[in-house]
């Protein structure tokens, strides 16, 4: 059964605490927090103040996805704000190894992220040091996009490397996840599913979390 990480990008910002408590009680394991800088991706979302505000109201694993150019500039700030996992895009820095080291030095779980156009080969040298790999299943920047099926073979390739090298990182998918698209990704080796619009653009977000779990029993 896949672990579920609702993305607050699609939550109700004026009732954020209500939405977080709902998904927490509803069986989610992580809370996905999308940081967009208006440069690496066009949109602006929210910053470390949100992580700091959310930290005391939930025990969910705070999964911070930095869609930020030169993420090194803000890693310490997000760690100090209370992130449990910090994800950095390999496309956003010439020094992915150093960025991941910085995260680990703060005692936070380190995640490397790849866009749909980036091959798994780009991150094989750093897989030994990460706790989680995020395979983007849409181009990052917006919620509500369609899942790109061609990303599934990258999940499978990553899972092969994971098994052959006896590594234990989680494999997360993000973008266009619903109870259909999650199935091939889970079968290919995904262990964590981010879901934004599928969970929150619904009258009953808890039923959507359960649907993702039921689809991957
Ligand atoms: C997209 C973000 C996602 C987004 C997913 O760039 O990284 O986390 O919230 O939204 P859905 O699930 O609606 O595709
Ligand atoms: Zn995300």
Image (cartoon, grey):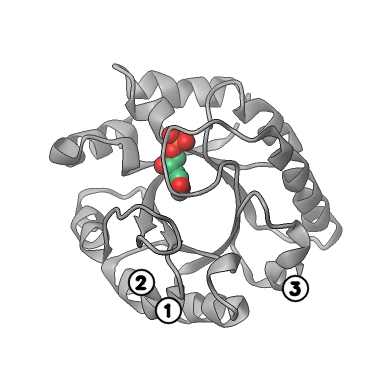
- Is 83 positioned to the left or the right of 53 in the image? right
Q: Residue 70 at x, y = what percent?
A: 46, 75
Task: Give the Cα distance between marks 2 and 1.
Answer: 7 Å
Callout 2–callout 1 Cβ contact below 8 Å: yes
**Which residue does the numbered mark 2 point to in the structure image?**
79
Task: Give the Cα distance between marks 3 and 2.
Answer: 24 Å
Q: Nearer the viewer, residue 71 or 155?
A: 71
Q: In this view of the protein, can residue 6 be seen by the observer?
A: no
Q: Quadrant of residue 6?
A: top left
Q: Quadrant of the C terminus?
A: top right
Q: Residue 156 at x, y = what percent?
A: 78, 44
Callout 3–callout 2 Cβ contact below 8 Å: no
| Secondary element type, mark 1 | loop
**Which residue does the numbered mark 3 point to in the structure image?**
125
Task: Give the Cα distance between marks 1 and 3.
Answer: 21 Å
- Label 2 crowd bin: few (<14), some (14–19), many (20+), radius 10 Å: many
| Point 20% across, 49% down: residue | 57
């Amino acid at each position: 059964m896949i672990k579920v990480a609702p993305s607050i990008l699609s939550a109700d910002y004026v009732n954020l605490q209500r939405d977080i408590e709902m998904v927490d009680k509803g069986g989610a394991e992580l809370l996905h927090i999308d940081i967009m800088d208006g440069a690496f991706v066009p949109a602006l979302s929210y910053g470390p103040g949100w992580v700091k505000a959310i930290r005391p109201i939930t025990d969910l694993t705070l999964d911070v996805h930095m869609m930020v150019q030169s993420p090194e500039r803000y890693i310490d700030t997000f760690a100090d704000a209370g992130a449990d996992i910090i994800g950095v895009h390999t496309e956003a820095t010439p020094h992915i190894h150093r960025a991941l080291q910085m995260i680990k030095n703060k005692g936070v779980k380190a995640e490397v992220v790849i866009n749909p156009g980036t091959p798994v080969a780009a991150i094989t040298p750093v897989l030994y040091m990460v706790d989680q790999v995020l395979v983007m299943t849409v181009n990052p920047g917006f919620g509500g996009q369609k899942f790109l099926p061609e990303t599934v073979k990258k999940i499978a390739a990553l899972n092969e490397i994971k098994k052959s090298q006896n590594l234990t990182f989680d494999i997360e998918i993000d973008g266009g996840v619903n109870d259909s698209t999650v199935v091939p990704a889970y079968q290919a080796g995904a262990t964590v599913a981010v879901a934004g619009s599928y969970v929150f653009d619904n009258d009953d977000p808890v039923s959507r979390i359960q649907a993702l779990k039921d689809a991957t029993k």
